[in-house]
Image (tube, helix red, strand yellow):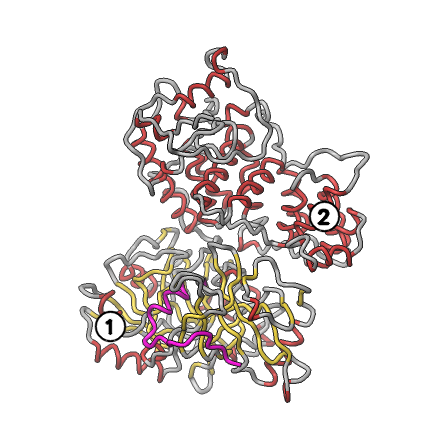
Amino acid sequence: MPKQKSLESAFTGQSDLAVPTPEKPDMKKRKMNDGGAVSGSPAAKVGELKKAVAAAPNPTEIGPMSLWTGAAGDPKTLISPAFDPELVAADFPAGKPVGFALVSDALRQIEALKGSGCGSRKKSTVILSNVFRVLLYSQPKDLVPTLYILINKVAPDFEDAELGVGDGGLIRAMCEVFGRSEVHMKNSIINGEAQDLGEVALLSRVSQKVLFMPPKLSIEKVFSEMKAIAACSGKDSGKTRKEKISKMLVASRGEEAKFIVRMLQGKLRIGIQIPTVLQAIAYAFQLTVPARGGEAAVGDVRNVKGKKPTFSELEVAMTSMEEAVKRAFSEMPTFECLTNALMAGHNGETLGSVCHISLGIPVKPMLAKPSKGLGEVGERMAGKRFTGEYKYDGERAQIHVISRDDIRVYSRNSQNMTEKYPDVIKVVQDSLCDNIQSCVIDSELVAYDQVAKKILPFQILSTRGSKNVSLENLKCNVCIYPFDCMLLNGKPMVRETLETRREALWSILKPTEGKVIFATYQNFDDLQEETIQAFLDESIAASCEGLMLKTLVDSATYQPSKRSLNWLKLKKDYLDGVGDTLDVVPIGAFYGKGKRTGSYGAFLLAIYNEEEEEFQTVCKAGTGFSDEDLVTHYEFYKERTTPVAESNYNVSDRMKPDVWLEACQVWEIKCADLSISPVHTSAMGMKAPGKGIGLRFPRFLRIRDDKGPEDATNAEQVADMFENQAVIGKDGGGDDE
């Protein structure tokens, strides 16, 4: 059978018989008769795409156009780089609701590609982008619902709209719909017939005979039901959720049931992260132009006669658009705002003018890289003016002053904490300078003894409630330590230098002892190790964790959601060779012995690998727990166990715990050092073939309520910590038994 001619060979005019045709997804095949096709018809366009006569330079291996070259395949399939939504317009009539099958089929193809080792990341991006292009061409209003469905959400993080569907409720709904017992459902997983509840739903659906099928599910219908489930509250909320879940499962076809169940669990498990989604959005808007201003939609700009952009022009435009889309979403993390701007015709050059940091829309904070000591500080800050600030041990808080009567406080993961901190609201109102109408401040909220005038440990702050907190019943006073300004009187400041932002910050609030204290700082024109060491010692003596070292002018913009080398954490522990703390997720527990009988004596802890979308073990920990901690953990987890490991737990057979736990909480731990491990799976293969990285002598510090499981330390950070540590242990394993 002859090989397909690739798009790359079409651009270059060269033969490409050595390039294999990608495996076609299992979709309905249509016969084409290119020779007899009427000019301008879909069939004729297929022939044109396959012959592809446009000449262009060779594509790069890493640029955006590298995704859109290669074997063309069938241009009606989502995996094809030559896909044109106009060719499938008959299947998706303009203005009509698009079936959920489009999303389900795309997810099925992406799942099949995952881990295949044949460019699955690029192909997955192409599939996603082509799904978005179908929606842009036929039904743009389905784009935002699809984006939220793909990231397992129904709204931006700051709207606190969580689906909140537990496995128990899902199983009961599945039993009712599919006519199977709960025991039978669970046994399907235990016996290995299915990897998760999604696959149980698929197996149940396939084996079920249905006399009458309800109307097909649409993207709009699935999303509206998901939003309704998230909004359920009150005494009948469980019943309402069950009814809505049942309706979707009854109407599901093909593999839709599998993905609906996974979405409700918040575990889509196909490796799609927000950066990939944003990349796919950028490419979709560059290749397909939605209808606007009385102009008809354009399915593929590469096929517009007389107006085809060159290969180089597309490469430049895609690169610009991708950078702009990612920057815009980091500063305004709502798909509604982003897609509205793109639908209006904004491109890589103009998108930032409408999608920028704004009041009432919190952004993910800029983060610092841990440094391994003054030597690295010297390397990173050489030739730059920089500042050192005390690193306070509290809760990160983004304060939005929308008006003097409307002040909101958001956590590091964008959750609204306004109800938790009424005292912060009052302090900000009282401290605002006269000329301030609005602002966004980055700060740390720290437990503070108003009588002794000193900082208190984080553990004191953690005793503070999160709801129904009033000024009259405060258990713990806090002091606001502002250290950055992101917006001032309506003007975004994130693209200004730190030196400029800090001057702006000092003009916003009036310092008040024990209430508002600007971060203690010291500026450096060059590296002076003795001075930095002395300042570090001062910070430790002042009950702080260490220093934050930041560039003042060079590369000194505020980068939301980025962990930047222009911000470095320097703790006393780093100089002692101990290393940074890690945020880990308990996924298993071991029964206690001796005085710990009756509770869990040790825990299997994991980090989160974003790329593989899985939890990877990093240690077994049994120290650092007080008797009270052990009781608290046992009470919390006794209703949060699972019969088998979740399918996204990567655990060696040698580390199997007595009890599997739901991944639902984050702990901060400290260790002596990190070592190559034959039994742990964190950062697997990144530093040694077939081996992961484990922690030696891990010790529990505290629960991190401000972080979700997917905010835990990731595999890349673990690998960096291993690389940066002062002393690398040579023996593997390293668990604290």
Residue 298, picture quadrant? top left
Q: Nearer the viewer, residue 185 or 504?
A: 185
Q: Nearer the viewer, residue 131 or 37?
A: 37
Q: Can residue 441 be seen?
A: no
> Disc number at residue 245?
2
At 52% from the left and 35% from the top, the residue drawn is: 131
Q: Nearer the viewer, residue 729 or 637?
A: 729
Mark sitting earlier along the chain (2/1) = 2
Q: Is residue 4 magenta?
A: no
Residue 105, picture quadrant? top right
User: How many callouts does the rendering have?
Assistant: 2
In this view, 20 is above or below 423: above
At 46% from the left and 40% from the top, the residue drawn is: 123
- Circle 2 crowding by C-alpha within 10 Å: few under 14, some 14–19, many from 20: many
At 25% from the left and 65% from the top, the residue drawn is: 380
- Between disc 2 and disc 1, the foreground one is 1
What amino acid is found at the position of numbered circle 1 in the picture?
Answer: Gly
Image location of residue 374, percent across then percent down:
26, 74
Residue contact at pointers 2 and 1, CB within 8 angstroms = no
The residue tagged with tag 2: helix, strand or loop?
helix
- Which portion, as a residue range, is magenta? 714-737
Image location of residue 312, percent across then percent down:
29, 32
The residue tagged with tag 1: helix, strand or loop?
helix
What amino acid is found at the position of numbered circle 2 in the picture?
Answer: Ile
In this view, 569 is above or below 206: below
Residue tagged by mark 1?
Answer: 375
Residue 17, picture quadrant? top left
Q: Is residue 722 magenta?
A: yes
Image location of residue 441, percent across then percent down:
41, 62
